[in-house]
Image: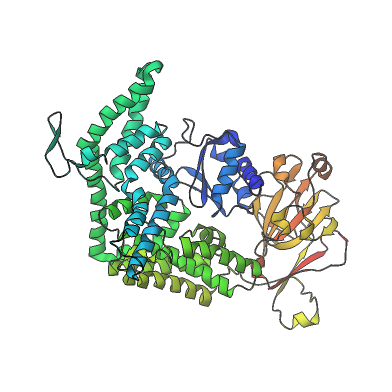
């Protein structure tokens, strides 16, 4: 299976199946709740070619995969017995973390349906606008039903997903949501109503979020209490019956109106801020959305957006949309400007999902965090674009991820385009004119060795790396692990060691020593970022047979002993000891050359690679 190994590696590096309380996924992330966060190997995960990044936020350990996350998720579930839901053993975290966790997990299963339905509604808007479809035709009404259904019946879907998250019966939770939309109840809207003589205010609960959130949270607590008091033989019917008898009237009398007022109050508050200073509100929202996404906390705003949409339009989404458009602009600029084919392919492959579907997390984790100068560009472009949309009063009319195809979801469309395209163009221009590489001060104490005269005319700077190992030199293409042989992690070379010692190839600083001791990261004084990975899949040895002699942050000199390892015992354990030496910031260099191309063996401290800036 294509994703079988990746799924296995992820489970292993979050502490194993026994350390996982529950697992869900959203558009690009696996969201783990771990029993002991300390058992997770974040560094090893981040160095896996199938993982874009790892984020801890919202009470979760989040592994960012990209658009194929659902395939990895299925593979994990297929090969494990992980409980895909609630567990009493979960790490609780702070109250805000728990709230974001509940919101995130409740909406995550619905995101595909919400985004798809939102795009369908946007498409219908375009078809009517260009005259290809009549808003009075039966075709329009049928497609509108498909686009409107998930939003209209949102209380039912949230009742189900929220109940699953809280460990309650999801079908009773869905029934509570359905009761709020049942014709006998909706027929009381606008008419005098009471329950057992208590006056009741019945409102329209279609497309609402907060009433069902409150109701199902109370229901989950009630169900647990009832199960403790009622005999098991009659729980099957009595617990749901009592729950419905108690929760539905309480929702109509109390939770529903309160939740509706809360949601409307938040909407009015945003509207108030927009009217007072749409410019300032939009700037803050546009600049801040990227950081909320990085922390995985952005789902906390989804209920507010949906509540505002139910009230006729949301001013928040256009402000936030500026940030994704700025991110897409940066990816576009790097795609156009990058000389490295691998980087160009990465920029193009991450730009398309963002531009067409609004999924920009691959851009964030694959490009922006890698080239951190661009994070400043996102803030500037997002703030300006968001300020424009806030000032002009744009509103989202349907739920959709911000993208070029979703532009019809915003109104007035022409005003939204001004803010969105400003963010896109600014992000692109800042990247083109100010650059995206994180170049460090280029002072070299190394002797310059010119590979040939033709190159020397064009080159301005070179750095020599000596061999960190004694052994047989191999090309990266000969390494059995595709993460290295494909050069996905960067260019470099490999050595089959004949001696169990690793020395430093440069003067520099230790940036990472993996807990298992099988790999070490170094940054040279001249800016080269080097990964030395001893053996293939040797992380599975959990540090056995490896003895690191330095720590992260240590200053090191060329030739200094860094790691000792027992190569015979590693081989006896069944592991390949071929050791890739990777330049992880390959895009910084014009060329990376093997100094002794015809030499089959090498000793430590002999010249190995020439890095040409």
Q: Can residue 478 be seen in this snapshot?
A: yes
**In screen coordinates, is 18 left or right of 265?**
right
Q: Nearer the viewer, residue 296 or 165?
A: 165
Q: Nearer the viewer, residue 109 or 549?
A: 109
How many marks on residues?
A: 0
Q: Can residue 285 be seen in this snapshot?
A: no
Displayed quadrant of residue 510 = bottom right
- Measured as percent of width and height from the top left, residue 68 is found at 56, 52
Q: Nearer the viewer, residue 544 or 283?
A: 283
- Measured as percent of width and height from the top left, residue 41 is found at 61, 44
Q: Which residue is pictured at 48% across the width and 32% down the height?
A: 87
Q: Residue furthest front?
A: 138
Q: Which residue is pictured at 39% across the width and 58% down the height?
A: 120
Tell me the quarter of the image containing the C terminus.
Answer: bottom right
- Measured as percent of width and height from the top left, residue 270 is found at 27, 57
> Can you say whether 433 is above or below 321 in the image?
below
Displayed quadrant of residue 19 = top right
Q: Which residue is pictured at 79% across the width and 47% down the height?
A: 576
Q: Which residue is pictured at 32% across the width and 56% down the height?
A: 141
């Amino acid at each position: 299976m294509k994703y079988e190994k990746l799924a296995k590696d992820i489970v292993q590096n979050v502490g194993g199946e026994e350390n996982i309380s529950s697992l869900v996924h959203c558009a690009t992330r696996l969201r783990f709740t771990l029993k002991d966060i300390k058992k997770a190997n974040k560094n090893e995960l981040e160095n896996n070619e199938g993982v874009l990044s790892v984020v801890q936020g919202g009470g979760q350990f989040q592994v960012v995969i990209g658009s194929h996350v659902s395939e990895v998720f299925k593979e994990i579930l297929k090969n494990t017995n992980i409980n895909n839901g609630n567990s009493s053993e979960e790490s609780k975290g702070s109250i805000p973390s728990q709230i974001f966790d509940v919101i995130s997990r409740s909406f995550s299963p619905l995101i595909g349906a919400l985004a798809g339905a939102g795009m369908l509604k946007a498409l219908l808007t375009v078809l009517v606008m260009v005259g290809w479809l009549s808003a009075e035709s039966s075709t329009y009404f049928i497609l509108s039903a498909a686009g409107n259904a998930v939003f209209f019946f949102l209380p039912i879907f949230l009742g189900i997903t929220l109940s699953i998250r809280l460990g309650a019966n999801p079908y009773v939770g869905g029934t509570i949501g359905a009761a709020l939309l049942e014709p006998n109840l909706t027929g009381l809207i606008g008419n005098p109503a009471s329950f057992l003589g208590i006056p009741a205010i019945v409102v329209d609960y279609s497309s609402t979020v907060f009433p069902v959130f409150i109701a199902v949270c109370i229901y989950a607590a009630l169900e647990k209490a009832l199960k403790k008091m009622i005999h098991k033989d009659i729980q099957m019917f009595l617990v749901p019956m009592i729950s419905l008898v108690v929760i539905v009237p309480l929702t109509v009398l109390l939770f529903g109106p309160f939740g509706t007022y809360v949601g409307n109050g938040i909407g009015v508050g945003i509207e108030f801020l927009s009217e007072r200073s749409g410019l300032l509100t939009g700037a803050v929202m546009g600049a801040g959305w990227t950081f909320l996404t990085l922390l995985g906390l952005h789902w906390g705003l989804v209920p507010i957006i949906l509540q505002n949409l139910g009230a006729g339009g949301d001013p928040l989404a256009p402000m936030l949309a500026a940030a994704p458009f700025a991110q897409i602009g940066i990816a576009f600029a790097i795609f156009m400007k990058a000389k490295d084919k691998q980087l160009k392919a990465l920029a193009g492959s991450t730009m398309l999902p963002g531009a067409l579907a609004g999924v920009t997390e691959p851009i964030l984790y694959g490009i922006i965090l890698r080239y951190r100068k661009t994070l400043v560009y996102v803030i500037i472009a997002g703030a300006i674009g968001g300020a424009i949309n806030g000032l002009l009063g744009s509103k989202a009319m349907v739920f959709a991820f911000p993208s070029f195809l979703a532009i019809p979801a915003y109104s007035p469309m022409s005003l939204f385009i001004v803010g969105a395209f400003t963010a896109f163009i600014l992000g692109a221009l800042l990247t083109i004119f100010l650059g995206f590489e994180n170049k460090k001060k280029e002072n070299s104490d190394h002797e310059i060795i010119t590979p040939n005269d033709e190159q020397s005319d064009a080159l301005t700077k070179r750095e020599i790396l000596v061999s960190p190992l004694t052994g047989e030199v191999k090309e990266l293409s000969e390494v059995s692990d595709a993460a290295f042989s494909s050069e996905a992690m960067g260019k470099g070379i490999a050595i089959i060691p004949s001696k169990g010692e690793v020395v430093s190839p440069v003067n520099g600083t230790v940036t990472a020593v993996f807990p298992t001791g099988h790999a070490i990261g170094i940054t040279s004084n001249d800016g080269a970022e080097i990964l030395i990975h001893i053996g293939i899949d040797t992380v599975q040895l959990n540090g056995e047979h490896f003895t690191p002699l330095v720590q992260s942050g240590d200053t090191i000199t060329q030739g200094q002993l860094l790691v000792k390892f027992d190569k015979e015992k590693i081989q006896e354990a069944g592991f390949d000891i071929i050791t890739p030496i990777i330049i992880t910031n390959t895009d910084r260099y014009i060329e990376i050359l093997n100094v002794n191309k015809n030499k089959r063996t090498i000793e430590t401290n002999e010249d190995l690679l020439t890095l040409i800036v």
